[in-house]
Image: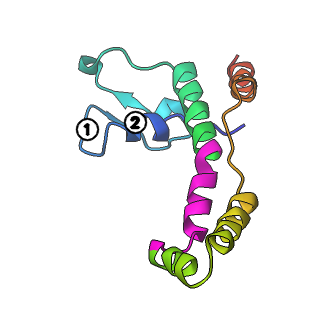
């Protein structure tokens, strides 16, 4: 199992933050931490945050896939004006059906987190 310990958590601080650094986001031992920031996050907490971050990205991926397939607003309005609302609805439904909405499954997230706990123990 390859766990990205650093990227999801520390990228949220932004590149200008200089109280921490790492040379390999997959190797917790490369994380240097300025203790004036508080205690260094432990490996398990970082790994669990990483799992949750990537799972949430996975769940919301359909939004990006859908939005890239929708016609522009102008084209949609033209379709309604020159065609019909029913024709526009068919177009939108095809896109929605091809890229169905996904929702987070708390049991799946917990299963993935347990895999990480097992791996690190």
Dominant SS of magenta comes to helix
Identify the residue at horizontal 61%, vertical 61% (top origin).
66
Q: Distance between the residues labelled 2 and 1?
A: 9 Å
Q: In which quadrant of the rendered view does residue 4 lie?
A: top right
Is residue 46 shown in magenta? Answer: no
Counting from the top left corner in percent of width and height, residue 90 is at: 71, 69
Callout 2 secondary element: helix
Along the line of sight, which residue is nearer the eye, 15 or 54? 54
Q: In which quarter of the image is the C terminus?
A: top right
- Tell how many labels: 2
Counting from the top left corner in percent of width and height, residue 116 is at: 69, 26
Residue 118 in the image: above or below residue 92: above
Along the line of sight, which residue is nearer the eye, 120 or 52? 52
Identify the residue at horizontal 67%, vertical 40% (top origin).
2
Counting from the top left corner in percent of width and height, residue 81 is at: 53, 80
| Badge 2 vs badge 1, beta-carbon distance below 8 Å | yes
Residue 98 in the image: above or below residue 112: below
Q: In which quarter of the image is the N terminus?
A: top right
In magenta, the rendered stretch is 59-73
Along the line of sight, which residue is nearer the eye, 43 or 86? 86
Identify the residue at horizontal 68%, vertical 48% (top origin).
101
Along the line of sight, which residue is nearer the eye, 9 or 120? 9
Residue 105 in the image: above or below residue 66: above
Label placed on residue 10: 2
Left or right: residue 64 compared with residue 19: right
Counting from the top left corner in percent of width and height, residue 69 is at: 60, 70
Label placed on residue 17: 1
């Amino acid at each position: 199992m390859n766990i990205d310990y650093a990227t999801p958590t520390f990228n949220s601080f932004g590149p200008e933050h200089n109280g921490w650094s790492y040379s390999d986001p997959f190797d917790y031992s490369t994380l240097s931490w300025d203790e004036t920031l508080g205690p260094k996050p432990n490996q398990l907490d970082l790994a669990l945050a990483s799992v949750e971050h990537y799972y949430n990205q996975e769940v919301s991926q359909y939004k990006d896939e859908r939005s890239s397939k929708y016609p522009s607003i102008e084209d949609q309005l033209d379709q309604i004006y020159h065609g019909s609302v029913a024709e526009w609805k068919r177009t939108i439904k095809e896109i929605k059906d091809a890229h169905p909405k996904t929702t987070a499954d708390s049991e799946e997230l917990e299963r993935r987190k347990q895999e990480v706990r097992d791996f690190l123990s």
